[in-house]
Amino acid sequence: MIDLIKKTLLTGVGFALLTKEKAEEMAKELASQAKFSEQEGKEFIDSLLSQSEKARGEFQSRVDETVQAALKKLNLATRAEVDELKAKVEELTARQDGTAPHNTLM
């Protein structure tokens, strides 16, 4: 049972990562082997491409969520926080050099 789940998951990930051209090629091959009519083959290809796009989007969303969760757990500073700190350091450096007024610190 575990092997079936693993294979299904890996197939889904592989399906999500298919390029449009590769998915079309695979769909055409499957359609010809199944002896679909031209209309059935077209519908099958369109369905497969649609599913591939949906799977790709879902996969990307999961990857994004996982990366965001990992970054949050690492407690790293955001780009905005780093930029704010850089501005404060620049201001303090300028103040120390006597080139900036003393009341502009955020």
Image (cartoon, rainbow, N blue to C red):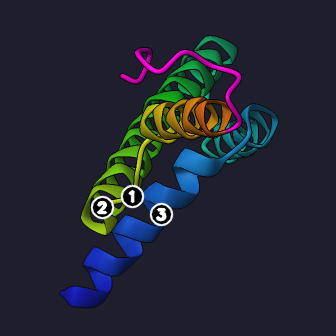
Whether residue 79 is situated above or below residue 106 in the rendered picture: below
Q: Is residue 80 left or right of residue 65?
A: right
Mark 3 or 1: in front is: 1
Q: 27 or 71, which is in the foreground?
A: 71
Q: Position of residue 9 (x, y in %)?
A: 36, 66
Q: Image point 57% across, 59% down: which residue? A: 14
Whether residue 73 is situated above or below residue 15 in the rendered picture: below
Amino acid tagged 2: Asn
Circles 3 and 1: CB distance less than 8 Å?
Answer: no
Q: Position of residue 106 (x, y in %)?
A: 36, 22
Question: What residue range appears in magenta?
Answer: 97-106
Whether residue 40 is situated above or below residue 17 in the rendered picture: above
Circles 1 and 2: CB distance less than 8 Å?
Answer: yes
Q: Image point 50% across, 42% down: which residue? A: 82
Q: Position of residue 22 (x, y in %)?
A: 78, 43
Mark 2 lies on a secondary structure that is: loop
Residue 98 in magenta stretch: yes
Q: Alpha-carbon neighbours of circle 2 within 10 Å: few (<14), some, or many (≥20)? A: few
Residue at image mark 3: 11
